Image (spheres, rainbow, N blue to C red):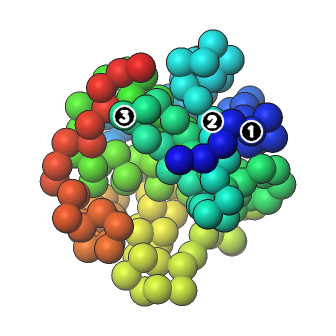
Amino acid sequence: MGETSFWAERAVKNTLTDSTVAKIKTFSFSGIGFDIQTFPVLKTFIDSGKIKVEYDSAKSGMAEYDYKTNTIITGIKIAIGYAEMGLIVHECVHAVYDVAKQKMSTAISEAIAYIVQSQYVYVANGPGKRLSHSNATKDLVFQYAWAIAACIQEGKPIDKLDKSNLISAISAHPFYAKNATSDAGFDGV
């Protein structure tokens, strides 16, 4: 586990209340809704200590949400770029669903988090600069999440094939493959 860090916690809380983050649009995916208005509420859970933020130098440039300990663990102390802030947004989506005790599969949880992360990048940079990964299997997740995020931000319907492709890409992703169909485990804080 990481260490308590004023800077990491500040990076997360600043991201949650960032004006760019506020431009992420509400949507539903596989019957589960997401509304960015939950982020200021999540900040109150961090302020009250119900959700912790820890810094772990071994996770440089990465982050995760541990629903068992209600902790956002990040290798980011200062989030200054769209990729870092997008990653924090991604993990905060998981925390929101943990607070709500939302039942869903790991694949659906990751799909929604990648879509919201991509929406953040879209509103921060416009339609021309999506997140990517050098590994083709991992990049497919960003590719399909980006297509869905762009539709949402532009007020267009989500393409059913993109939705199906995103779930398939997450299910093939080496981080999620073995647990893709398992319950995400959100048990409340």
Marks 2 and 1 sit apart, C-alpha to C-alpha, by 7 Å
Q: Left or right: 92 with respect to 103?
A: right
Marks 1 and 3 sit apart, C-alpha to C-alpha, by 20 Å
Callout 2 crowding tier (Cα within 10 Å): few <14, some 14–19, many ≥20: many
Q: How many marks?
A: 3
Contact check, label 2 and label 1, Cβ < 8 Å = yes
- Mark 3 / mark 2, whichever is N-terminal: 2
Residue ID for mark 1: 5
Three-letter code, disc 2: Val
* Secondary structure at numbered mark 3: loop
Label disc, if present, on residue 64 of the rendered structure: none
Residue shown at 45%/61% (left/top)?
A: 145
**Whole-percent x, y for residue 18 in the image:** 77, 36
Callout 3 crowding tier (Cα within 10 Å): few <14, some 14–19, many ≥20: few
Residue shown at 34%/46% (left/top)?
A: 109
| Residue 48 falls in image quadrant | top right
Residue ID for mark 3: 68
Three-letter code, disc 3: Lys
